[in-house]
Image (cartoon, rainbow, N blue to C red):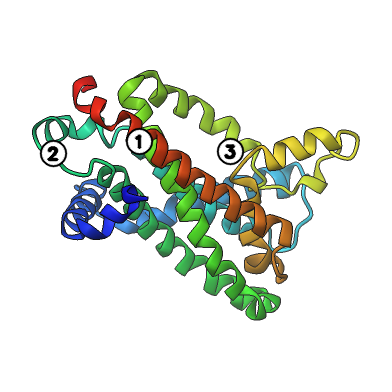
Amino acid sequence: MRLYADLFRYRDLFLNLFRRELRVKYRGSMLGLVWTLINPIVLMLGYWLLFSILLRAVSIEHYPLFVLSGLVTWMFFQSAIQMSCTSLLGHANLVKQVRFPRQLLPLSVVATNLVTMIVMLAFVLPLNLIVIPETRSTFWAALPLFIPLAALVTGFSILLASATVMFRDIEHLVVTVLLPWFILTPIFYTFDQLPGISSHPKIANALYYGNPIAPFVEAIRDPLFWGRLPQLGDVIYVVGVASAALVIASLVFRRVDDQLAAQL
């Protein structure tokens, strides 16, 4: 796994790339990291108004916190993989002129979005602990799950960054897929609330386990919002899929690494 060991061998370079990525993301912004909170809060208010108040399609107590607890996971995933698509393309001159571990570029994108996720978690977690007393004894179980989540996002980011260099349509494909992917992920609803889900158990399993981010959302939200420990099956799944993502990304990147400069 030399691909990831280079993160420590070239840590000074990685830190420079990370700091640059963070500055670029919020350059010219008056609010900076505050946008990390504004975006999910606006989304939450929209879903709260539509699904809980107007449609009355959900009857979850503390529904705004329910949505925010799911958005902590999704927004990190979405933002990181979307930004990573162009992480190599955006540094084409650097990739072509200097020989260095190129995977550090998408890794710096992941690290930048990890900071924004921590800021959002630091906002959501205290609210949950204050409003939902049951979470005070379980919230700790959510914290280790952010490690496989970061691993999954890392694998996806390296894969997509490499694929976008080889096939430029990947960037547009990701943008197209993310909206239906978000809708099919249980962020603003739970699967057992869907009227037709009991009639189609195979579809339900496909939507849940065929969507690598869905078990992460549920496993993290269980202790963070519901005040219960995550299900063992979800924990096994998230660790397994995160490990697979890292291995596949490593294998693919090693095969295309020598071709990246030529393709750029």
Residue plotted at (18% across, 35% down)? 91
Residue 99 tag number: 2
Secondary structure of the residue carrying numbered label 2: loop
Q: CA distance from mark 3 to mark 2?
A: 37 Å
Residue 166 picture quarter? top left
Residue type of the residue flagged with mark 3: Phe
Relative placement, left or right, of 236 versus 247 is right
Q: Nearer the viewer, residue 21 or 237?
A: 237
- Identify the mark nearer the N-term, 3 or 2: 2
Mark 3 or mark 1, earlier in chain: 3
Task: Measuring from the top left, give residue 169's x and y in whole percent.
Answer: 39, 18
Expressed as whole percent of the image width and height from the top left, the position of residue 183 reads: 63, 36
Provide the residue designation for mark 1.
Answer: 253
For the question of whether residue 78 can be seen, the reply is no
Residue in view at x 51 percent, y 54 percent? 149
Q: Residue furthest left?
A: 97
* Residue nearer the viewer, 229 or 240: 240
Q: Quadrant of residue 197?
A: top right
Q: Earlier in the sequence, mark 2 or mark 1?
A: 2
Q: Is residue 12 left or right of residue 223?
A: left
Label 1 crowding class (10 Å Cα cut-off): few <14, some 14-19, many 20+?
many
Report the residue marked by disc 3. Answer: 182
Measure the C-alpha gap from mark 3 to mark 1: 27 Å
Near mark 3 (Cα within 10 A), the count class, few <14, some 14-19 or many ≥20, is some
In the picture shown, does residue 202 fall above or below 36? above
What's under tag 1, amino acid-wise?
A: Phe
SS state under label 1: helix
